[in-house]
Amino acid sequence: MSANTFPAQIEPFKWAEQGFVWAGTLPLSRFVRISREAVGSIDDQLINIDCKLSMDAYHRIVWLSGHVETKVSVECQRCLNPVEINLVSDFHLALVDDESLIERLDEDADFIVLGESEATTKGSFDAPATADLLSLMEDELLLLMPLSAKHEFCEHKHQPAVEELAEEKRDNPFDILASLKGKLN
């Protein structure tokens, strides 16, 4: 594998023993879920990644550590124009192949149990677990995406401006009742 090739699938335990380290940039287009949220062209947008795998002293927990960083333009929920957000994450994830190992982790440690959604095996019970490294990096970035992205200051497109509301005179419902009472008497 060349130094610039980012591995999509890894064997965490094997690669941690070998001291896997990768640093470089990837196009935003490789991160499908984030690309769906982006507005405008993403052709020139890059994600900076620096990651490594290491193993604990007991050789049962693999740690994926690193840093990911990018900027993504998404739609502002107020004005509907693009707003650029910075996505920066320093992460330290425990990759375990047995849920019983979770008890050994600090209570605030982030972890992924291999064999669930992020990992697959190659057909036999004894085959080594693999993890989708690209997906793990994307998950870290998605956790940083705001639920409702917006500019710090902008005008809401769905509602009239404050001046328009002030100018608009509304009928008082009690005035209408009073006029009806006068007509009945």
Image (spheres, helix red, strand yellow):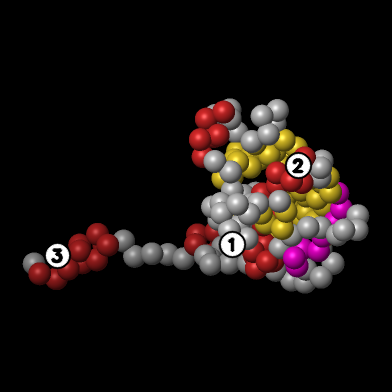
Quarter in which the C terminus is drawn: bottom left
Label 2, residues with CA under 10 Å away: few <14, some 14-19, many ≥20: many
Comparing labels 2 and 1, the label whose residue is closer to the camera: 1
For numbered disc 1, what is the local secondary structure? loop
- Disc ID at residue 123: 1
Residue 103 visible? The answer is yes
* Residues tagged 2 and 3 counted as in contact (Cβ below 8 A): no
Instruction: Identify the magenta region.
Output: 23-30
Which of labels 2 and 3 is toward the front?
2
Q: Residue at x 78, y 54 (%)?
A: 70
The majority secondary structure of the magenta stretch comes to: strand
Query: In this picture, is 114 found above or below 39?
Result: above
Tell me where residue 33 appears, x and y as whole percent.
64, 64
Rendered position, 45 above or below 91: below
Task: Determine the secondary structure under disc 3.
Answer: helix
Residue in the picture at 64% in, 36% down: 60
> Where's residue 175, x and y in %?
26, 62
Residue furthest to the right in view is: 3
Q: What residue type is labelled 1?
A: Gly
Mark 2 or mark 1, earlier in chain: 2
Q: In which quarter of the image is residue 181?
A: bottom left
Name the disc covering residue 16, or none: 2
Choose top left, top right, bottom left or bottom right for residue 54: top right
Would you say the residues marked 2 and 1 are in contact, meaning their CB atoms lie under 8 Å apart? no
Q: Which residue was labeled with disc 3?
A: 181
Write the residue at 77% across / 40% down: 17
- The one nearer the camera, 15 or 153, is 15
Give the Cα separation between the discs numbered 2 and 3. Answer: 84 Å
Amino acid type for the residue under numbered disc 3: Lys
